[in-house]
Amino acid sequence: MTKAAWEEGFAARAKAYWTEARTAELVRDKALAVTPAEAAPLLRAIGLLHRDASMPPTQHRKFFQVNHMVRLLESGLRALRAKHATIQLLDAGCGRSYLSLVLAWCARDVWGHRLEILGVDRDAAIIDECRRRAELAGLDDVTRFEVARLDELPVPEVHGVLALHACDTATCDAIALGVARGAELIAVAPCCQAELARGWSGLTQDGAFAPIWRTPHLRRETAAHVTDTMRALLLRAVGYEVSAVEFVPGEHTRKNTLIRSVRSGAPDAAARAEYLALRDATGGVGLALADRLAIA
């Protein structure tokens, strides 16, 4: 069977399976960018649909997460579509490429706009899986996946940078790369923010924050929120409008903050001052990202 015949056959199977009633039972009152009947070959390629076109309950959460991410990024991507005939996105720490491939499909089949994505990860096996999925979904002409470190990555042009659940300082690597390349959209969902907690663990002086410094659990938990606050302030300081929103309900994961940034071009001196004040108030330990962005 040719790939085209498989796509046609699976799409027909999905349309027959996903009746109006069955779709309504799954979707309920949610506004979705991607539905099973419309994007069946894509959802099969990324492992969210079975061979019979059904969606197992274990995949519902991922399905809704990806749809929600598309909605959160939609306004930023709409602005990029208005400015660029072809949008260039970098997915830093792309993992198994769920979001990359869904965005590429939406650009082609919903928005009617060319969007090219470079997905990067350090795991060669994962990158092989991403390439397999892209080919199966028929999106290998607009997606490329490479094994690389961000600080060694030659990227000629980037309009947007995404980094979902990149661990610890990898999120800062993505932010620094996006700022250095003048990305107009930077969206990161941080994970395992340990840099600040490591710095606090070595502090011995007295201070209002000392009870947090010396309590490992509180140090880790507090550091995660302060780290995200510092990242947002640093992005504002170098000319981005920033919002921090919950992108996954807390019952699914505690790593559920999306820092969404759109370049405004106007550095914010007040944000720089707030970053420095927050750094000093919490013990004088800042983020290495501040040095990389030339925020003293």
Image (spheres, rainbow, N blue to C red):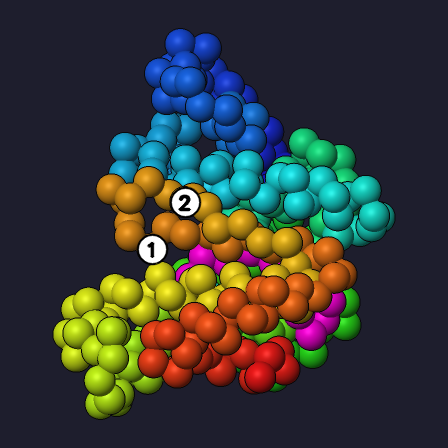
**Magenta segment: does it hold 27?**
no
Give the camera-side residue of 191 and 25: 191
Tell whether position 186 is magenta. yes
Q: Name the residue located 32 percent from the left edge and 84 percent from the top edge.
A: 199
Residue under the point 29% across and 52% down: 254
Q: Earlier in the sequence, mark 2 or mark 1?
A: 2
Q: Marks 2 and 1, how far apart in space?
A: 9 Å
Task: Tell which residue pokes out farthest to the top in this image.
Answer: 21
Secondary structure of the residue carrying numbered label 2: strand
Q: Position of residue 181 (x, y in %)?
A: 72, 71
In the drawing, does residue 163 fall left or right of residue 180? Answer: left
Q: Quadrant of the N terminus?
A: top right
Q: What is the number of the mark on residue 246?
A: 2
Read off the magenta span.
179-191
Mark 1 lies on a secondary structure that is: loop
> Compared to 71, does 242 lie above or below?
below
Q: Which residue is mark 1?
A: 255
Image location (x, y in percent) of residue 119: 58, 63
* Residue at the spot 25% in from the left edge and 64% down from the top edge: 221
